[in-house]
Image (spheres, rainbow, N blue to C red):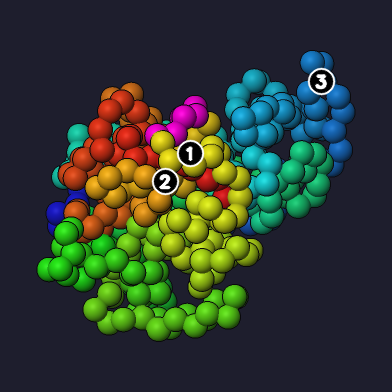
Amino acid sequence: MKYRRYLRTRAALLSIAGFAMLVAASTVTYVVARPSPTDQPVLTLGAAKASGGQARGASGYTYQRSTGPDRTEIIDSSGEPVAIMTDGARTAHIDGPPRTFEEPRFTDAKIETKMWVRLTPQAWHAGAEQEKWFIDWLAAARKDRSPDVLAIAFEYVDGAPVKKDNQGQQYSGDASFGPPDPADPDGRQERSDFYDYLGLPWSFLDGKAAVPEPQRALALDCSGYLRMVYGHRLGYPLLGTNTPGEGLPRRAYAMAEVGPGVQLMPNSGQRTRGIDRLLPGDLLFFNAQPIPNRQIDHSGIYLGIDDGGHHRFISSRSQTDGPTMGDLSGEPLLDGVGYWPDRWLTARRI
């Protein structure tokens, strides 16, 4: 097995439901099952005003409104962060047990984070903390240790172990970028979507029907990788086309320009500004042409700040034949100077 995970554990780990993954810093177990409603803490509806214009709920949470982008930051009674909810987006950033993500074959960098990235049932709006759907969801989400966006993203890197469902269908494991193509400058074909990886025909809500190509089995191009993580694995609606709609389009340019959620900064055709707006799980969009312009043709997922102090992302790249946060074909960083920092154009939180 080419892929290795380095673990630092403080206690013996029991296997739970046969579906577990260890990550460093403290022992964390990912499980398929979500918490039972009977195990959820009781949170009451309604909120009263706290000092400083903040809203304090009966649960003891404080709700602080911030901008850039507009969002609600949830803090517990001891002053510790609980979650960040962004207006118009379903992506939730929840504080939880620390984890470490790494890919030692291709980089020495590590991502150490306490942030867990999940999807809410509906888009957030100011005041939603008073609504029952969110109170119930947050109670469960704070206890949920099933794979989130970041953990799922690493289920497709080089050497990742194969996982299958009860019918024997493989749904994760080392993904390639696409079949070999001697005519392509990077040596691999694009156009491998999540259904190609799965080898299953798919019907989309916008009427598009897709049939997998056998030579693309277990392959994911850059946008197909995002659709696998957010769509097939986490249930975000997916479109079969690149037109606006209630779902994630097929191509990177369409995700950036007409995709759902919140665009975090405009695409001016130049290296973007506003790196401080990013949170782990945000979708990143790049121009990978020989001569930079505003065209978007590559996408990735922001991971956060690595142990070297750099803003790092993960993406499926033809040069490395699949998803990686590694440094082959240019360090996947957003700060400093280099191939990828200079070609980063915009970002979106879905």
Q: Measuring from the top left, give residue 290's x and y in whole percent.
A: 24, 47
Residue 202 relative to residue 84: left or right:
left
**On the image, which quarter does residue 71 sit in?**
top right
| Label 3 element class | helix
Name the residue tied to disc 1. 268
For label 3, count other residues whose C-alpha is less than 10 Å away and answer few (under 14), some (14-19) or many (20+): few
* Residue found 56% across the figure and 56% down from its top: 259
Circle nearer the N terminus (3, 2): 3
**Disc number lying in front (1 or 3):** 1
Residue 29 visible within the image: no
Name the residue tied to disc 3. 53
Q: Quadrant of the N terminus?
A: bottom left
Amino acid residing under circle 2: Arg
Name the residue tied to disc 2. 294
Q: Nearer the viewer, residue 344 or 283?
A: 344
Amino acid residing under circle 3: Gly
Q: Which residues are magenta?
A: 271-276
